[in-house]
Image (cartoon, helix red, strand yellow):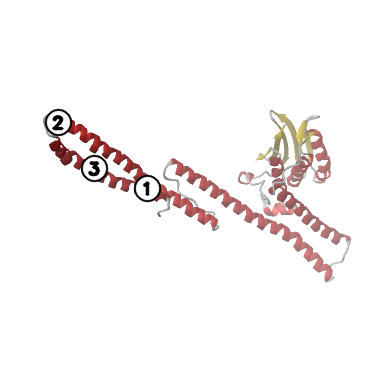
Amino acid sequence: MGRGIAARIALAALISAAVGLAILAIGVTVVGAESFKSLMEEAGVSADHAQRMYDQSVSTVVVAAVVVAALASVGLAVVMARMLARPLAEVGAAARRIAAGDYAARVPREGPEELASLADSFNQMAAGLERQEQLRRDFIANAAHELRTPLTNLQGYLEALRDGVITADRATYESLWEEAERLVRLSRSLDALADGDAGAGPLAAVELDLAAAIRTALELAQPTLDRAGLRVVVDVPERLPARANADDLAQVLGNLLSNAARYTPAGGEVTVRAERRPGDLLVSVTNSGEGIPPTDLERVFERFYRVEKSRDRARGGAGIGLAIVKQLVEAGGGQVGVESADGRTRFWFSFPA
């Protein structure tokens, strides 16, 4: 306790009070006494008698006042120190709970504005840590599921081949190949996310034609779009100079187009637009279809997050593509977003001009 902030605050308050009382006592007992004696001598009273009168009246009162003031200062200093120390002790206790894994720990907002601000900052930090811990658990659970599904399928096929239940024909090998490809795609996506988390950062930006990059991405995605029976609308200028990393841009466009092809029903429409705005360039990919519920819009860029788990797995997605889009765009200084209403979902990203 002697080394705590409460004791130090109390000691500082007592020292300040002691200095003030000492100055007051010296002024009253020394300066005041001399002035009193001078006045009394002018009135015809001897110096000794004047001193006795002063000691019996003023000095006694001063000593009593000093004692009372000292006791009051001690009491007030202790109360004030405890008022300031208690919120800090609560922050310390909550911090120890978080260190032990209890991310739900919070501290009340009370005390002076500075301590209340500290409580707000601590609670905000605790909420962020709690959310990150939940994301970590979801990530592990979803990654395990994504790995388990193709591995289980591979194991089933191989056991059936070993036991002679099925024949090793072309269809069987194609099924095995598809499951292996799924694992390869998942591992590459995880590598991309890990590179971003490690702070590898984007490659150097170069001068390029954004319109040409979009047309190239559409050409690569056209077979997938055609197989899905989708109509593609392109609203892109003939030329749109930009500065970006070509590989990152191609991956972002490819992921968004693949996402649109996966979730647009047959006969639907995919619209790709690009425009220059003051200070940045905006690209959007809009598709018709079921749309995304408002409660899910904030989470679609999270790793492995799915709006409808069973439906998405049936369509072959691992739930990582949009997370990679967000990571690549933000690493290049841009922003991403999504809007969904009236049967149309629009994903967009922007980057500095």
Q: Out of 104 and 49, give the one closest to the viewer.
A: 49
**Percent coordinates x, y for residue 87 in the rendering:** 43, 49
Mark 2 and mark 1: span between their CA atoms? 43 Å
Q: Out of 304 and 316, give the one closest to the viewer.
A: 304
Helix or strand or loop: what does disc 2 sit on?
Answer: helix
Q: Which residue sits at x=79%, y=58%?
A: 179
Q: Answer left or right for 306 relative to 120.
A: right
Q: Are marks 3 and 1 in contact (CB under 8 Å)?
A: no
**Percent coordinates x, y for residue 164 in the rendering:** 85, 70
Residue on which the image places disc 3: 65
First along the sequence among labels 2 and 1: 1
Helix or strand or loop: what does disc 1 sit on?
Answer: helix
Q: Answer left or right for 351 relative to 89.
A: right
Q: Residue furthest left?
A: 44
Asked if residue 182 shows in the view, the reply is yes
Q: Residue furthest bottom?
A: 163
Q: Out of 287 and 121, give the one closest to the viewer.
A: 121
Residue on which the image places disc 1: 11
Q: In which quadrant of the rendered image does the N terminus lie? A: bottom left
Q: Out of 91 and 142, give the one closest to the viewer.
A: 91
Helix or strand or loop: what does disc 3 sit on?
Answer: helix
What amino acid does circle 1 point to? Leu
First along the sequence among labels 2 and 3: 2
Asked if residue 317 shows in the view, the reply is no
Dot in front, 2 or 1:
2
What amino acid does circle 3 point to? Ala
Residue on which the image places disc 2: 41
What amino acid does circle 2 point to? Glu
Image: 351 above or below 316: above
- Quadrant assignment, res 29: top left
